[in-house]
Image: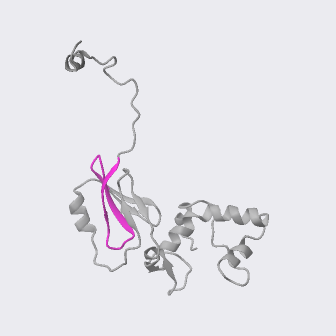
Amino acid sequence: MRHRSSLEANRQPLVRAPAVVIAGNPGIVSHEVMADRRHVLTQDTWGRVALWDVLSGAPVTHYGKVDFDAKRRELWEAVAVPAWFSSDTRLGCLAITLEPPGCFAAEEYAACLEYGNVPDDFKVNFGRLVLECAFAKWRRKVVQSLSGGGADARLAGAAEGGGGPAPCPYYPEPWPKFWQCKALP
């Protein structure tokens, strides 16, 4: 009987080169939540650095191949915003986790978020905004199925605790498309 080591030494692969290569996107290997708690700086396996907006769920700026730490120091601003989400890149993509009650701690004036036609003192809660947008299409479908498609505003107002009809704060397009038109919930 031959030893296992001699059998392993004589093995040769049947195919030396792959027949097909499926190219994928580079995975995100490092990230840093910026001080404004709205943006996250990421670096992928190819060394490219990008700045993501957590509210829109998309990259805002691509910096290319630059030093990650230098870019982090350059973008850092001294602002005090409570931590309202946690982030990780274990799966190779940026994952944002909202944990109550901390996810409802951060607010910003709507004017600072560049929303038009809003009062100066109107505040937007980041956690509520993200959750409303994530479930906007689902809620719209549920409201339509319950009402036959006609009483969106009445049911949305009742769900919010209001007594009468209220304008429906949900959008026909799934998240994040409504961010592009700067609509307020």
Q: Main secondary structure of the magenta part?
A: strand
Q: Quadrant of the C terminus?
A: bottom right
Q: Position of residue 124 (x, y in %)?
A: 50, 78
Does 173 appear above or below 152?
Answer: above
| Residue 46 drawn in magenta | yes
Q: Position of residue 50 (x, y in %)?
A: 34, 57
Which image quadrant for residue 145? bottom right
- Examine the rendering and report whether any part of residue 181 can be seen: no
Q: Residue at x 61, y 65 (%)?
A: 136
| Residue farthest front in this picture | 1
Does 161 appear above or below 145?
Answer: below
Q: Position of residue 99 (x, y in %)?
A: 45, 70
Does 42 appear above or below 82?
Answer: above
- Examine the rendering and report whether any part of residue 146 can be seen: yes
From the viewer's perspective, tell me whether residue 138 is left or right of residue 109.
right
| Residue farthest bottom in this picture | 121
Does 11 appear above or below 179?
Answer: above
User: Which residue is at the front of the view, 102 or 182?
Assistant: 102
Q: Residue at x 28, y 68 (%)?
A: 75
From the viewer's perspective, tell me whether residue 73 is left or right of residue 121.
left
Which image quadrant for residue 146? bottom right
Which image quadrant for residue 73? bottom left
| Magenta residues (range) | 27-49
Q: Quadrant of the N terminus?
A: top left
Q: Residue at x 54, y 77 (%)?
A: 116
From the viewer's perspective, tell me whether residue 52 is left or right of residue 168.
left
Q: How many marks?
A: 0
Q: How was this image coloured?
A: one colour
| Residue 53 drawn in magenta | no
User: Which residue is at the front of the view, 100 or 124?
Assistant: 100
